[in-house]
Image: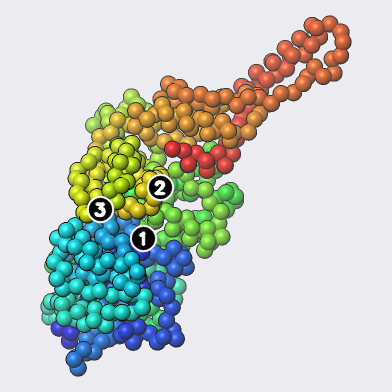
Amino acid sequence: MQKNIRNFSIIAHIDHGKSTLADRIIQECGAISDREMSAQVMDTMDIEKERGITIKAQSVRLNYVKDGQHYILNLIDTPGHVDFSYEVSRSLASSEGALLIVDSTQGVEAQTIANVYIALDNDLTLLPVVNKIDLPSADPDRVLAEVEEAIGLDCTEHNLISAKTGLGVKDLIDAIVDRVPPPNGDENAPTKALIYDSWFDNYLGALALVRVYDGSIKKGQMIKVMGTGASHQVISMMYPHPLKRQDTLEIKTGEIGIVVLGLKTVDSLAVGDTMTDHKNPTLVAIDGFEPAKSFVFAGLYPIETDKFEDLRDALGKLKMNDSSLTYEPESSHALGSGFRTGFLGMLHMEVVKERLEREFDLDLIATAPTVIYKVALTDGSEIEIQNPSELPSPTKIDMILEPYVKSTILVPDEFLGNIIKLLNDKRGIQLKMDYLGKRVLLEYEIPLNEIVMDFYDKLKSCTKGYASFDYEPIGFREGDLVKLDVRVAGDIVDALSIIVPSTKAQTKGRDFVKQLKELIPRQLFEVAIQASVGSTIIARETVKSMGKNVTAKCYGGDITRKRKLLEKQKAGKKRMKSIGKVDVPQEAFMAVLKID
């Protein structure tokens, strides 16, 4: 019965209790016995459990009885982090309602606001829920007032719960049944379903998690994926469950289920794409679909150069589960062969690197993260570059455009001065500043390049960890940018090139060469380390040569004998300097990433 289905998502800032609440709702509905229950039962990866974050959206179908009526609840647990906000938007597009979870001790955070806006764009019914009310420092009244002030959401009907102890969870499920509207699709229309997640299973191949809007999907049906235009036969289907999936012959209007098409990769099941019937397709696809776009790029290189093929295989296997990951081979004089890899953001990059090292037993070096730049050339054409070494010569460049993001920052007012100084250093442009009680909501436009390196760490350290931060891309703008090269013994080290604002080039260059001077080992000849913009050298440090006492065997005799030996040594060092090669050690590489 369509009127007895409730599709809802859980949205909140990181660590406000999304996954714990999901555990309690599953338990309350009796989907998992207490014996089978584990903490964060819907988080399947070790790395998710260790870090306490959700990386992949998960769903579960639950049965619930209220007042003698049997209801089906489809719960979608979404990731909280900004890197996965597109996945959040597709999960919310699959729901009619959302639980807005706010921690009663911390209040509204930056990501709470960002995710609420996505939910409001999708016309969802929002249920305000204040969590962690069992803690001594809980202040639900202040938090509800903050939600009303910051988001403009009416909180007269709200739920106070403790996801950890289960207090108030049953009342919350009753509120979901009463207040979240049922799906309103047409059962007789052609099949129309949204893919809001896809992953790879070793036994079944690529799986698509879908929400059916109109019609239904039946076993054996020929299904067309509208984004690729390809048609596939439905081999089997099941309802999602963290431990034991339940097979079904049909996923009806308004329901959520997993479709098995027997595909070998997830590339053709992109998140946000529409599935329809092959013979009788729907006329209009579900809007909002866009292919996953990488925002941050870094080179990944194996520390042992003979592990290049292993890294290629590992990336191929990871991509089976994560279609947003992109990679292509590249080589560097300093680091050998590796891959230029594209990520959704910094957390995505950390997670991918950690999974490669853990699951595939690789030791990797990641180069400094960079972003995509657009370069307008003097001949009127435009190119996109991900790597500073791809930048054409300055004579061919008309202008360089860099990506900007709109960021939302919430911070206690005592740290406001520190934050504004940091944002000004990062070339931020202020849009808005609002006071919410003792906290300040800031909106800034910042170049993406300024936040991919160490911005988050600095934000946390200058606010004692109290600031919360969220951002969304807003397009490209012209920037006064130059490419900063590092030369060691006259040769440019390609993997150390970075693109910087021309006003910061001098100081960055100076810091760069100072760091390298400490790390490059001394040779028998003098080594010059230079930072240059184009052909202009803007900073230089010299690694002194190792001394060798060639006059030790000269005792007594005429001074000209010593001078002759020293002249001979000088000529030898000069010749060595012209043909000598300096290897940049990999530690130098790691340290350069920490440069301010």
Select label 3 or label 2 by which is in front.
3
Task: Say few, some or many: other residues with alpha carbon within 10 Å of mark 1 (under 14 / 14 to 19 / 20 or more).
Answer: some
Instruction: Report which residue position mark 2 lands on.
Output: 461
Q: Amino acid at mark 1?
A: Ser
Q: Amino acid at mark 2?
A: Ser
Q: Are marks 1 and 2 in contact (CB under 8 Å)?
A: no
Instruction: Report which residue position mark 3 lands on.
Output: 438
Asked which secondary structure carries label 2, the reply is: helix
Which of 414 and 231 lies nearest the eye of the viewer? 414
Q: Amino acid at mark 3?
A: Lys
Measured along the vertical axis of the image, is residue 470 above or below residue 574? below
Asked which secondary structure carries label 1, the reply is: loop
Using the image, tell me which numbered label, if any, was put on residue 44: none
Decide if residue 402 is in sight here.
no
Decide if residue 325 is in sight here.
yes
Q: Are marks 3 and 1 in contact (CB under 8 Å)?
A: no
Residue 375, position in %: x, y?
30, 35
Could you tell which of marks 3 and 1 lies nearer the N-terminus?
1
Q: Residue furthest bottom?
A: 68
Q: Quadrant of the N terminus?
A: bottom left
Asked which secondary structure carries label 3, the reply is: loop
Which of 56 and 324 lies nearest the eye of the viewer? 56
Residue 253, position in %: x, y?
18, 79
Task: Say few, some or many: other residues with alpha carbon within 10 Å of mark 2 (under 14 / 14 to 19 / 20 or more).
Answer: few
